[in-house]
Image: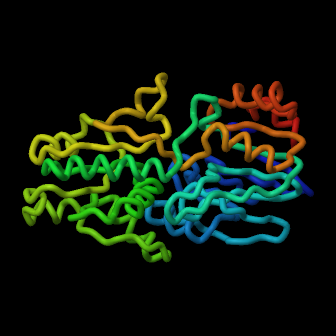
């Protein structure tokens, strides 16, 4: 682990995994297009899916020297968001952000066998166990139905890239259906990339045409603070109720997962049990943990499962290169 991210040196090649700054002399693997995984500039060869390249371009980063495949490297669907991949090479599997649960159009990741596993553990504590998708759909549909029966509009909130598209597919049968302008833009790109999502009007146009005055309605919007100007206006002017989707929703320790009127525990990451199952399925002899509860999850793997595991810290680079 370096200040720039994860560096692997294999067969005289430098492989940078989700680097903050690309390496001009190496192969730079970008797992997906969330902002915290995109490099700040171009340089060297960028290995990523075409979907990641297209979404990154929409978000202001145009990949140069982009390739979709490379000999001896396998891009593995990670199930996180559209185009998200893990990377398998030289018996090393880097998960990127990963989810093994099916969610709408997103199929859960299938885990390859490897000797060394580098895995995220965003929800690497036993308290993070998420409900089944069927339970979530039932709960939310019942909640929307109750609010609609009272003439109350509903705003469904999740990350603009990833969760908002899943929400659109799971609950887009309600109507009238509107989208925050930023979500509409991202949904349109997903449609161009082959994902079937129901169309709807952007919030600016709907508001301009007076359509939001005709209640109830449903809107898909990015996750944002209850103090944001947009949410305050939707609440004061239209009496809207917010339903937020976050893996942090049911945690008693992290209040930022409950910034909405109703909070639903749904995530684009593995929960704790899924992380454990993923490690077992990989058959890895050595596991390195990154992003999240790295020490706690590594300790669980060692003490409970007898698996050699440790956090991948900046000083531990020599342990696996």
Work out whether residue 85 or residue 166 is closer to the camera in this orientation and state it. Answer: 166
14 shown above or below 246: below
Quadrant where the C terminus sits is: top right
- Residue 77 appears at what percent x and percent y? 66, 62
Q: Is residue 185 left or right of residue 92?
A: left
Work out whether residue 281 or residue 311 is closer to the camera in this orientation and state it. Answer: 281
The answer to whether residue 25 is seen in the rendering is no
- Residue 226 appears at what percent x and percent y? 26, 36
- Residue 189 appears at what percent x and percent y? 42, 70
Work out whether residue 98 or residue 182 is closer to the camera in this orientation and state it. Answer: 98
Residue 29, located in which quarter of the rendered image? Answer: bottom right
The answer to whether residue 214 is seen in the rendering is yes
What residue do we see at 11% from left, 63% from top? 211
131 shown above or below 294: below
241 shown above or below 308: below
Quadrant where the N terminus sits is: top right
Q: Is residue 220 left or right of residue 60?
A: left
What residue do we see at 18% from left, 60% from top? 204
297 shown above or below 20: above
Q: How many marks?
A: 0
What residue do we see at 50% from left, 40% from top? 247
Residue 124, located in which quarter of the rendered image? Answer: top right
Q: How is the image coloured?
A: rainbow
Q: Residue furthest top?
A: 253
Q: Residue furthest right?
A: 11
- Residue 305 appears at what percent x and percent y? 83, 32
């Amino acid at each position: 682990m370096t200040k720039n991210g994860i560096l692997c040196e294999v067969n005289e090649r430098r492989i940078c995994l989700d680097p903050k700054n690309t390496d001009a002399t190496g192969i730079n693997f970008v797992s997906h297009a969330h902002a915290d995984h995109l490099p700040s500039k171009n340089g060297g060869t960028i290995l990523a899916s075409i979907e990641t390249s297209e979404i990154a371009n929409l978000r202001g980063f145009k990949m140069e020297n982009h390739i979709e495949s490379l000999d001896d490297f396998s891009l593995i669907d990670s199930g996180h968001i559209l185009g998200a991949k893990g990377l398998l090479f030289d018996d090393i599997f880097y998960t990127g952000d990963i989810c093994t649960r099916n969610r709408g159009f997103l199929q859960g990741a299938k885990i390859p066998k490897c000797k060394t596993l580098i895995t995220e553990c965003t929800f690497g504590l036993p308290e993070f166990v998420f409900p089944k998708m069927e339970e979530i759909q039932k709960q939310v549909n019942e909640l929307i139905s109750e609010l609609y029966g009272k003439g109350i509009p509903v705003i469904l909130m999740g990350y603009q890239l990833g969760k908002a598209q899943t929400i659109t597919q799971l609950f887009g049968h309600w109507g009238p259906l509107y989208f925050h302008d930023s979500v509409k833009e991202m949904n349109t790109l997903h449609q161009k990339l082959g994902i079937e999502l129901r169309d709807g009007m952007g919030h600016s146009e709907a508001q301009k045409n007076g359509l939001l005055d005709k209640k109830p309605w449903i809107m898909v919007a990015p996750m944002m603070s209850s103090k944001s100007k947009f949410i305050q206006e939707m609440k004061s002017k239209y009496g809207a109720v917010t339903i937020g989707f976050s893996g942090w929703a049911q945690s008693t320790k992290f209040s930022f997962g409950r910034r909405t009127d109703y909070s639903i525990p749904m995530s684009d990451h593995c929960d704790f049990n899924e992380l454990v199952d993923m490690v077992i399925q990989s058959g890895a002899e050595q596991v390195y943990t990154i992003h999240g509860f790295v020490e706690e999850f590594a300790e669980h793997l060692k003490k409970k499962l007898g698996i050699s595991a440790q956090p991948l810290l900046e000083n531990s680079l020599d342990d696996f290169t």
